[in-house]
Image (cartoon, grey):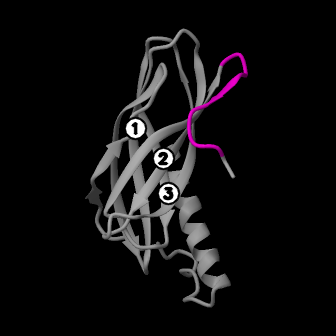
Amino acid sequence: MRPFVLIIAACAASVALTGIAHGATPAPAAGEALRLSAARPIPTDVAGQPGPVRIDGCFSDGRGSDGLTLVHHALRIVNSGSQAITAVRVRFAFYDAFGDVNATRTNIAEARIEPGATADRINLAELSDAGPPVRITCSIDAVRFADGTIARTGPPIR
Protein backbone atom coordinates (compact mmCIF):
# COMPACT_ATOMS: atom_id res chain seq x y z
CA MET A 1 0.00 0.00 0.00
CA ARG A 2 1.37 3.45 -0.89
CA PRO A 3 2.33 5.75 2.03
CA PHE A 4 -0.07 8.48 0.88
CA VAL A 5 -3.00 6.05 0.98
CA LEU A 6 -2.06 5.21 4.57
CA ILE A 7 -1.94 8.92 5.43
CA ILE A 8 -5.41 9.48 3.96
CA ALA A 9 -6.79 6.48 5.85
CA ALA A 10 -5.28 7.76 9.11
CA CYS A 11 -6.65 11.24 8.48
CA ALA A 12 -10.09 9.87 7.67
CA ALA A 13 -10.09 7.89 10.92
CA SER A 14 -8.99 10.99 12.83
CA VAL A 15 -11.73 13.08 11.20
CA ALA A 16 -14.35 10.47 12.08
CA LEU A 17 -13.22 10.18 15.71
CA THR A 18 -13.03 13.97 16.12
CA GLY A 19 -16.54 14.33 14.71
CA ILE A 20 -17.96 11.68 17.03
CA ALA A 21 -16.26 13.33 20.04
CA HIS A 22 -17.87 16.66 19.15
CA GLY A 23 -21.34 15.24 18.56
CA ALA A 24 -21.14 15.53 14.77
CA THR A 25 -22.49 13.09 12.25
CA PRO A 26 -21.13 9.62 12.94
CA ALA A 27 -18.40 8.11 10.82
CA PRO A 28 -19.35 6.34 7.61
CA ALA A 29 -20.60 2.80 8.15
CA ALA A 30 -18.35 -0.13 7.35
CA GLY A 31 -17.78 -0.35 3.61
CA GLU A 32 -18.65 3.32 3.02
CA ALA A 33 -15.93 5.72 1.90
CA LEU A 34 -15.22 9.22 3.11
CA ARG A 35 -16.27 11.43 0.21
CA LEU A 36 -13.84 14.26 -0.50
CA SER A 37 -14.23 17.01 -3.06
CA ALA A 38 -11.98 17.17 -6.11
CA ALA A 39 -8.46 18.44 -5.46
CA ARG A 40 -8.08 22.22 -5.59
CA PRO A 41 -4.59 23.73 -5.92
CA ILE A 42 -3.54 26.00 -3.05
CA PRO A 43 -0.89 28.68 -3.74
CA THR A 44 2.20 27.67 -1.76
CA ASP A 45 5.34 29.69 -1.08
CA VAL A 46 8.67 28.45 0.25
CA ALA A 47 10.01 30.64 3.07
CA GLY A 48 13.63 31.81 2.92
CA GLN A 49 15.82 29.23 4.60
CA PRO A 50 19.41 29.53 5.75
CA GLY A 51 21.72 26.54 5.71
CA PRO A 52 22.57 23.65 3.43
CA VAL A 53 19.16 21.93 3.53
CA ARG A 54 16.29 23.65 1.79
CA ILE A 55 12.90 23.09 0.25
CA ASP A 56 13.33 23.65 -3.47
CA GLY A 57 9.64 23.26 -4.28
CA CYS A 58 6.38 22.79 -2.37
CA PHE A 59 3.07 22.18 -4.12
CA SER A 60 -0.21 21.86 -2.22
CA ASP A 61 -3.81 20.98 -2.94
CA GLY A 62 -6.89 20.56 -0.79
CA ARG A 63 -9.84 18.19 -0.74
CA GLY A 64 -12.80 18.98 1.51
CA SER A 65 -15.55 17.14 3.34
CA ASP A 66 -18.01 18.47 5.93
CA GLY A 67 -16.01 21.56 6.94
CA LEU A 68 -12.67 19.77 7.05
CA THR A 69 -9.93 19.96 4.44
CA LEU A 70 -7.26 17.36 3.78
CA VAL A 71 -4.26 19.29 2.48
CA HIS A 72 -1.69 17.30 0.48
CA HIS A 73 1.85 18.62 -0.01
CA ALA A 74 4.44 17.39 -2.53
CA LEU A 75 7.94 18.61 -1.69
CA ARG A 76 11.36 18.64 -3.28
CA ILE A 77 14.17 18.92 -0.70
CA VAL A 78 17.83 19.61 -1.53
CA ASN A 79 20.77 18.61 0.68
CA SER A 80 23.73 20.74 -0.39
CA GLY A 81 25.54 20.02 2.89
CA SER A 82 28.19 17.46 3.76
CA GLN A 83 26.09 15.12 5.97
CA ALA A 84 23.42 12.59 5.01
CA ILE A 85 19.90 13.39 6.27
CA THR A 86 17.47 10.79 7.63
CA ALA A 87 14.46 13.02 8.46
CA VAL A 88 13.19 16.55 7.92
CA ARG A 89 10.48 18.27 9.95
CA VAL A 90 8.54 20.71 7.76
CA ARG A 91 6.54 23.65 9.14
CA PHE A 92 3.41 24.76 7.27
CA ALA A 93 1.68 28.11 7.90
CA PHE A 94 -1.95 28.21 6.69
CA TYR A 95 -3.24 31.69 5.79
CA ASP A 96 -6.89 32.73 5.77
CA ALA A 97 -8.70 35.10 3.39
CA PHE A 98 -7.58 38.10 5.50
CA GLY A 99 -3.87 37.27 5.07
CA ASP A 100 -3.48 36.09 8.67
CA VAL A 101 -1.98 32.77 9.79
CA ASN A 102 -4.94 30.79 11.14
CA ALA A 103 -3.01 27.54 11.73
CA THR A 104 0.49 26.12 11.74
CA ARG A 105 1.36 22.48 11.39
CA THR A 106 4.57 20.48 11.41
CA ASN A 107 5.01 17.14 9.74
CA ILE A 108 8.02 14.80 9.58
CA ALA A 109 9.31 13.29 6.37
CA GLU A 110 11.44 10.21 7.05
CA ALA A 111 13.71 10.24 4.00
CA ARG A 112 17.39 9.59 3.49
CA ILE A 113 18.94 12.38 1.44
CA GLU A 114 22.64 12.01 0.71
CA PRO A 115 24.94 15.08 0.48
CA GLY A 116 24.44 16.79 -2.87
CA ALA A 117 21.21 14.90 -3.57
CA THR A 118 17.62 16.01 -4.09
CA ALA A 119 14.54 14.15 -2.82
CA ASP A 120 11.66 15.09 -5.09
CA ARG A 121 8.93 12.66 -4.08
CA ILE A 122 8.18 13.64 -0.50
CA ASN A 123 4.45 13.59 0.21
CA LEU A 124 2.89 14.88 3.42
CA ALA A 125 -0.71 15.58 4.44
CA GLU A 126 -2.39 17.83 7.01
CA LEU A 127 -5.93 18.35 8.23
CA SER A 128 -7.36 21.85 8.38
CA ASP A 129 -10.53 22.30 10.42
CA ALA A 130 -10.67 26.02 9.64
CA GLY A 131 -11.66 25.39 6.03
CA PRO A 132 -9.32 25.38 3.08
CA PRO A 133 -6.36 27.73 3.45
CA VAL A 134 -6.10 30.52 0.89
CA ARG A 135 -2.30 30.31 0.86
CA ILE A 136 0.40 28.20 2.52
CA THR A 137 4.03 28.89 3.38
CA CYS A 138 6.38 25.96 4.02
CA SER A 139 9.83 25.87 5.58
CA ILE A 140 12.23 23.43 7.19
CA ASP A 141 11.79 23.36 10.96
CA ALA A 142 14.39 20.73 11.92
CA VAL A 143 16.72 18.17 10.35
CA ARG A 144 18.00 14.84 11.71
CA PHE A 145 21.34 13.77 10.27
CA ALA A 146 22.49 10.17 9.76
CA ASP A 147 24.85 10.45 12.78
CA GLY A 148 21.83 11.22 15.02
CA THR A 149 22.46 14.94 15.50
CA ILE A 150 19.55 17.32 15.11
CA ALA A 151 19.64 20.85 13.75
CA ARG A 152 16.66 23.08 14.47
CA THR A 153 16.07 25.82 11.96
CA GLY A 154 12.59 27.07 12.83
CA PRO A 155 11.37 29.37 15.58
CA PRO A 156 11.73 28.06 19.14
CA ILE A 157 8.91 25.78 20.31
CA ARG A 158 6.98 27.27 23.24
Along the horizontal axis of the image, is 142 left or right of 100?
Answer: right
Between 52 and 21, the residue placed more toward the observer is 52
Which of the 4 quarters of the picture holds residue 47? top left
Disc sitting over residue 147 in the figure: none
Residue 114's place in the image compared with 157, above or below, is above
Mark 2 lies on residue: 124
Look at 34% across and 51% down and name the residue there: 60
Q: How far apart are marks 2 and 1 (CA)?
A: 8 Å
Mark 1 lies on residue: 75
Residue type for callout 3: Glu
Would you say the residues marked 1 and 3 are in contact, meaning their CB atoms lie under 8 Å apart?
Answer: no
Residue 123's place in the image compared with 10, above or below, is above
Magenta run includes residue 147: yes
Magenta run includes residue 149: yes
Residue 109's place in the image compared with 80, above or below, is below
Residue 1 showing in the rendered view:
no
- Label 3 CA crowd tier, 10 Å (few <14, some 14–19, many 20+): some
Q: Position of residue 89 (x, y in %)?
A: 57, 39
Look at 33% across and 56% down and name the residue there: 61
N-terminal label among 1 and 3: 1
- Label 2 CA crowd tier, 10 Å (few <14, some 14–19, many 20+): many
N-terminal label among 2 and 1: 1
Q: Is mark 1 on a helix, strand or loop?
A: strand
Mark 3 lies on residue: 126
Would you say the residues marked 2 and 3 are in contact, meaning their CB atoms lie under 8 Å apart?
Answer: yes
